[in-house]
Image (spheres, rainbow, N blue to C red):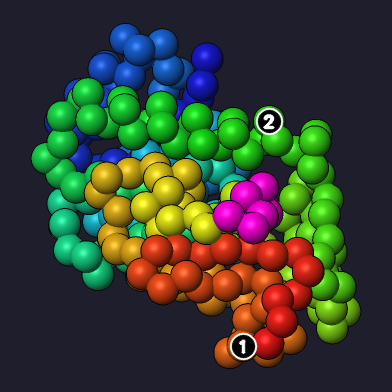
Amino acid sequence: MPRILLIEDEQDIASGIVMNLELENYELQHEDDGEKGLAAVESAKPDLILLDVMLPGIDGFEICRRIREAGNRVPILFLTAKDLEEDRVRGLEAGGDDYLPKPFGMKELIARIESILRRQSWYEKALPEMPKDEFGGNKVNFEAYEAQNFNNERIRLTQKECMLLRLLMENEGRVVERSEILDRIWGTDNYPSTRTVDNLVLHLRKYFEQDPAKPRHFLSVYRVGYRFTRQAAAE
Ligand code: CA
């Protein structure tokens, strides 16, 4: 039974969520402020966190940042009153997995939760087949979420970076469209913009390309998406 931690200060919303998710056989723990929520992340070891943005004490973005800083990769779904592109981008860049603006229906919430848990298991299931890989002098450890690049720098990768890297490497030589990347990595029709994908690719280039401005492994295909090649492409 997946365990969900709900950090939400609005009692009405919280009780609606708790009731509906328990009916779907999720195990729920609810905290109503930032401090307690953050403490519960450690103690409750949830499989997924539903995180309100505007909270007393520490806000949701900050909670998310601290969870990621501690190396914890539990999936986080932001719930927020604001539906501004800037906020969505901020949430995802703080390390959130998805973003659901209020008011939302319970069916929508449940669909998002299932989709996040499914993507998580896609990544984890593929781990035994390809726990580590290398290309162009870069060694990637998908299990430990870290890499050592051609320059012998150690890099701690975020979960999204690892997922994108795996997706591109699994599809070596084929163009992966931005929409497919959004679907596989974020899995939402509410995504901020394809800019988020481009930003993530920029991270990979910065880590793994000798000259990030002239990529030879993570190639752009104009207006379509990205193609990975293990053998550095000719300049
Ligand atoms: Ca709130």
Asked if residue 231 can be seen in this view, the reply is yes
| Majority SS type along the magenta span | loop
Quick check: 78 above or below 150? Answer: above
Residue at image coords 51%, 64%: 226
Which residue carries the number 1 mark? 214
For the magenta stretch, what is the residue range? Answer: 169-174
Which residue carries the number 2 mark? 125
Amino acid at dot 2: Lys
Image quadrant occupied by the C terminus: bottom right
Q: Is residue 164 left or right of residue 9?
A: right
Quick check: 52 above or below 210? Answer: above
Q: CA distance from mark 1 to mark 2?
A: 33 Å
Mark 2: few/some/many CA within 10 Å (<14, 14-19, 20+): few
Choose the circle earlier in sequence order: 1 or 2: 2
Asked if residue 57 can be seen in this view, the reply is no
Tell me, yes or no, whether the highlighted magenta stretch contains residue 187: no
Image coordinates of residue 198 in percent, x first then y, are: 44, 71
Image coordinates of residue 106 in percent, x first then y, are: 21, 25
**Element under label 1?**
loop
Amino acid at dot 1: Lys
